[in-house]
Amino acid sequence: MLENLHKPEFIKNLVLTGQTTRFTVQVVTAASASIFVLLAILTLVGVLKSFFTLADFLVLTILSVTGIYGMYTSLQARKIYKIDRIFPDFVRDLAESRRAGMTFTKAILFASKGNYGILTPEIQKISQQVSWGSSVTDALITFSERVKTKSIQRTISLIIEASKSGGNVADVLDVAAKDAREIKMLEAERKANMASYVVVIYVGAFVFLAIIAILCSSFIPAMTGSSAQGMQGALGGGSVRQEDILPIFYYATLIQGLGSGLVAGVFEDGNLSSSVKHVFVLVFVNWIAFKVLLGM
């Protein structure tokens, strides 16, 4: 009985905070990763024997997590970028509505009927939350937590403080809209400047992979072949097998791809969550290169 009373409230909060899609992505990601981890364990204990090795299943685990979640975060980042670009127009319209004599609540309800592109559903959620009895302050805070950008959170804080202080809210809204535009311009400039560093990271990763591929395809076979008896004697008489050397390079490229992807995401926008898509690309390319080209 109590569970049924709390269930609608939980669903309502889930919809208002925009966590439904995120929760679904997390469940799918966890399920796919769990499957590959289970296959890796079965391979380790010798129950499962297939074309894929233990390392392959661990790589597939990384790819499943970074691929699904990386795609989701990439789409969310693109959505938030568009919202950030339109949000100052919404704040400016709120200021005009306040100057026309509307209350904050009526101004938001009126704005929810307008067309702000990708921001329109978010404004409608704010309006819906207000119509359900929540205060304007709570609705705006929920909106800022839903989109989670520094620009919008800063602007929402200014709006809330201006509303509480009882001053000229319209002027504060104009200032907040101008401040949001300037912050967006600075972020776009920073991202453009850091794009060259991301390119350098990708170039370095692919150069490293090319060097490893050349070593594995020409140098290592020559070192471990029948013509390498002199080298084997110099190493103390022990035999050097290609099967013992290739896995070292294989793991080195995977670790290098993982690290380069993490750094690329931080360079791109200063957020570690942006790294997952770069990790997916670099680890996937390295894995395919060894599995297809070198037959690992």
Image: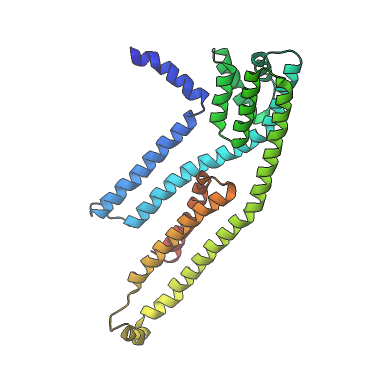
Q: Nearer the viewer, residue 47 or 98?
A: 98
Q: Who's the residue at 69% across and 26% down the image?
A: 91
Give how far across and how far down residue 175 sits, in percent.
72, 29
Q: Who's the residue at 38% across and 39% down the image?
A: 30
Say which quarter of the image contains residue 293.
bottom left
Q: Nearer the viewer, residue 187 or 4?
A: 187
Q: Which quadrant of the rendered structure holds the N terminus?
A: top left
Give how far across and how far down residue 148 sits, in percent.
55, 34
Say which quarter of the image contains residue 171.
top right
Q: Which quadrant of the rendered structure holds the C terminus?
A: bottom left
Q: Is residue 91 visible?
A: yes
Residue 41 lies left or right of residue 245; in this view the side is: left
Give how far across and how far down residue 269 sits, in percent.
58, 46
Residue 8 lies left or right of residue 51; in this view the side is: right
Q: Is residue 281 visible?
A: no
Q: Is residue 259 above or below residue 30?
A: below
Q: Who's the residue at 48% across and 51% down the image?
A: 280
